[in-house]
Image (cartoon, rainbow, N blue to C red):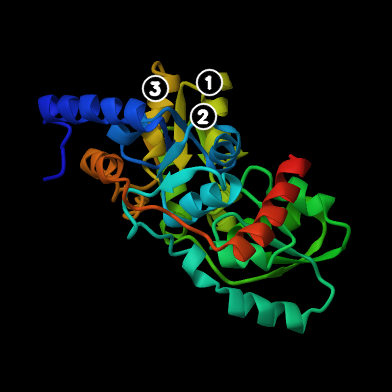
Amino acid sequence: MTTTATDTSGAHRLSARIDELRRLRRAIILAHNYQLGEIQDLADFTGDSLELSRHAAQTEAEVIVFCGVRFMAETAAVLARDKTVLHPEPRAGCPLADMITAQELRALKGAHPGAPVVAYVNTSAEVKAESDYCCTSSNAARVVEAVPAQEVIFVPDRNLGLWVQRHTGKRLLLWQGHCPTHDRITAEAVQDALRSYPDAEVMAHPECRPEVLDLAHQVLSTGGMIRRAQESPAATMIVATELGLIHRLQQVAPNKRFTPVSRLAMCPNMKRITLEKVLWSLEDVSGRVQVPDDVAARARTALDRMLEVT
């Protein structure tokens, strides 16, 4: 049975047992900012995709328990080849990552010979292996600017690609993928929130639609939103991204009001991982993520280029 917020004694027992196994397995628990609050609180480190990638590459732990969606755990397995990477819920995929395959990217490259490929980190290891560079939402513009070409293939998120194109002046050949969770956030919902809180500052994730980004005061990755929450003079902040981030924002800036643009902006896959599943994964060393050596080597090249740029 899934632990609820009201089952505090059960959650405490689960957390205590996870801590025992974490020490026994010499494990580190990494959690994305969209995870359930109980998972964020349990993690050794919580962050956005770029921050988590860096921790996976640098950790001295023997086991990485990755609480996020599958492409994130794959990225950790690519960057930390000598570690055991566990994904507590293998069914927790990413619809955006699933919107392009390696075969489709090869066909796109064939239609635009010579154009370098920048792949958003929200892709499979196989797609990364077909790419020249990877990027995250926090560094996408910097990566594209660093590419020595004026025409760049950008996959798979069209909204992020449009944002990058606007801020780099380069011509991006965009794949028409999107994040269903961020695509549910509308300009009308932002305007409604501003009518309720006219003095609020709006933060939006660049996976949102262009008309939503046009209304935002700040367009930021989740890590950027956390930093902005601590720096902004605004007492109220309207947040246009997945609901899980509110938990972290309230922790880092407890004296501010954070209101989500839409209660519909919830990623069901991000919420699949629970305390029980983390426990089972550590008990049985189950959910191991393995990427073939040849795929990992080529994907690692694209990821390393991203890390060098940033």
Q: Is 101 displayed left or right of 236 in the figure?
A: right
Figure check: 249 above or below 135? above
Pick whichever of labels 3 and 2 is earlier in the sequence: 2
Where is residue 166? Give x, y as percent: 74, 55
For disc 2, the marked residue is 226
Q: Amino acid at mark 2?
A: Ile
Residue drawn at point x = 49 percent, y = 56 percent: 71
Q: Position of residue 165 (x, y in %)?
A: 74, 58
Q: Check disc 1 and give the amino acid type.
A: Gln
Q: Are marks 2 and 1 in contact (CB under 8 Å)?
A: yes
Residue at numbered disc 1: 230
Q: Earlier in the sequence, mark 1 or mark 3?
A: 1
177 lies left or right of 20: right
Could you say which quadrant of the image residue 46 lies in?
top left
Crowd around label 2: few <14 · some 14–19 · many ≥20 (10 Å): many
Dot 1: element: helix
Quadrant position of the C terminus in the picture: top right
Describe the element under mark 2 as helix, strand or loop: helix
Which of discs 1 and 3 lies nearer the camera? The answer is: 3
The amino acid type of the residue labelled 3 equals Gln
Return the residue nearer the eye: 134 or 249.
Answer: 134
Residue 208 as seen in the image, left or right of residue 4: right
Can you identify the residue that label 3 sits on?
Answer: 251
Q: Residue at x 56, y 61 (%)?
A: 125
